[in-house]
Amino acid sequence: MLRRTGRPALTGVLSAALGLAVAQLLAAATRPHAAPLVAVGQAVIDATPTPVKEFAVRTLGTYDKPALLSGIAVVLVMVTAVVGVLSARRPWVAIGGAALFGLAGAAAALSRPAATSYDAVPSLLGAAIAGATLLTWSLPRPATPDRRTFLRTTLLVTGGAVLAGAAAETTRRVRGGAAARSREAITLPAPADPAPPVGVAPGFSSARLYRVDTALSVPRVDVDAWSLRIHGMVEKEMSLSFADLLERPLRERDITLNCVSNEVGGPYVGTARWLGVPLAPLLAEAGVDAAANQLVARSADGMTIGTPVAAVLDGRDAMLCVGMNGEPLPLEHGFPVRVLTPGLYGYAGSCKWVTELELTTFADFDAYWVRRGWAARGPVKTASRIDTPRPFARVAAGKVMISGVAWAQGRGIRTVEVRVDERPWRKAELLPVPSSDTWVQWRYGWDATPGPHTLAVRATDGTGTVQTGERATPFPDGATGWHTITATVE
Ligand SMILES: Nc1nc2c(c(=O)[nH]1)N[C@H]1C(S)=C(S)[C@@H](COP(=O)(O)O)O[C@H]1N2
Ligand SMILES: [Mo]
């Protein structure tokens, strides 16, 4: 029994592994985004319905991508095992199976926004190798190969797959290293317009910025090969190198960025000290057509993010960021250049790895998330979060500090109030902030009495509007509701 299905199954899986590893190696050496695993994973991400994506981000957080790759691997193993078993009797199944996988990989690679026709090659070559291996290995023979022959072939194919796989990984790292090295070589000029000094407790120094993007592998852009093209409804097209950007007056600001997918109380909000080139004067130089109302940013990995032109030009600190917290942008936060539009959720104003700015209209173009049902314009909603005590914490009776953050970029935060159980709302103390685009850190000294308690927070923005307590889901334009936790006082 094991001989009848175990061997053919293994034959199928190992032949596929060899083909896949060679395809990954070829792609790593030539066109990283054409690697079948990355291309298929990326195509799955793009095709995943929004609710499923939301669920994945909510339950898996940053493990969503490893989980996706593991899922693909499991499916691959199962399907190629079946192909192996079936082709032991019917050799055409080996050819058909390989062809299907090859075409799927090629189609996924070609569906990437920046694809060239060459990108089909790694998948097709890998499929040819997998098919040929499986076919010769499982070809009906006068006598079933003995155990020793089978073992030898198994070792050979496995060895080939492991070698090619390791070479692919090494190549990927070395190539990625070029981007990292180009980053190390950068010296950022001092800002012409430095951030205003912050008070006692800067609201950003220790906080790490969250990461949210659709990139299965972080785009590794070599800054020396990078340029930004400004085109579309402009009088004069422009192309800027990184050096061109650094020659312009740089502005430094402490700005809070948050994700539209963030649940009430969630982690996808953070503040950093950004260094960048103001966008408004750049657009003025390009001469924006009065009819253009959307600025579409495109990234090296094909993301599109549409921002109202009015938001970029209304005097807020919209910029092309080159630095974050005193360093060049980290690779995962958009190196070498990202857009940042304070007051808009990231999906609507903060394209990472940007390579293109196109002036167009909302009527003419739907950006990536808009095509998936999210609101075309993404102004941030006023929100607040309790960070301590943690939900369901047990704390000692007496003075307990309730603390957290609140944000309403552009409008600023005027007051934060805390409510314990059904008692009246009480004003929290706010730490000073450098600008209305920076979140506010707040705290409230609570005389905690034994028993279970419910704690809630709400903020009032700079226009005097109180944060709504009405619950809304993140889809389609951002969550609302008061962050409410329970804690037990002992
Ligand atoms: N190229 C690219 N830029 C992107 C995204 C992306 O998927 N690809 N995600 C956006 C979203 S949804 C958010 S919330 C912010 C997150 O920025 P961060 O990862 O630097 O915190 O980046 C935005 N810019
Ligand atoms: Mo986001």
Image (spheres, grey):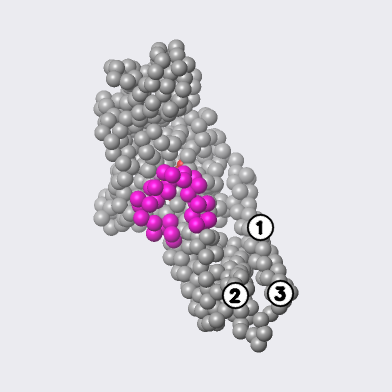
Is 162 on the left-hand or right-hand side of 268? right
Amino acid type for the residue under numbered disc 3:
Arg
- Asked if the residue at label 3 sits under 8 Å from ligand 1, the reply is no
Amino acid type for the residue under numbered disc 2:
Arg
Assign the magenta stretch its main secondary structure.
Answer: helix
Q: Does the magenta stretch include residue 53?
A: yes
Where does residue 399 sit, x and y in percent of width and height? 44, 13
Q: Is residue 110 magenta?
A: no
Quick one: 488 or 344, which is closer to the camera? 488
Quadrant containing ligand 2 reads top left
Q: Give the range drawn in magenta.
A: 43-71
Q: How far apart are marks 1 and 3 (CA)?
A: 34 Å
Q: Distance between the residues labelled 2 and 3?
A: 13 Å
Q: Please report whichever mark, 1 or 2, sits nearer to the chain's N-terminal start.
A: 2
Residue 170, labelled with which disc?
1
Q: Which residue is depicted at the point 63% across and 80% down? A: 136
Q: Which residue is depicted at the point 64% across and 85% down? A: 141
Amino acid type for the residue under numbered disc 1:
Thr
Quarter the N terminus occupies: bottom right
Residue 4, labelled with which disc?
2
Q: Are marks 2 and 3 in contact (CB under 8 Å)?
A: no
Q: What element carries label 3?
A: helix
Image position of 243 with respect to 107: above or below: above
Q: Which residue is depicted at the point 49% across and 55% down? A: 68
Q: Is mark 1 on a helix, strand or loop?
A: helix
Quick one: 331 or 467, which is closer to the camera? 467
Q: Mark 3 points at which residue?
A: 147
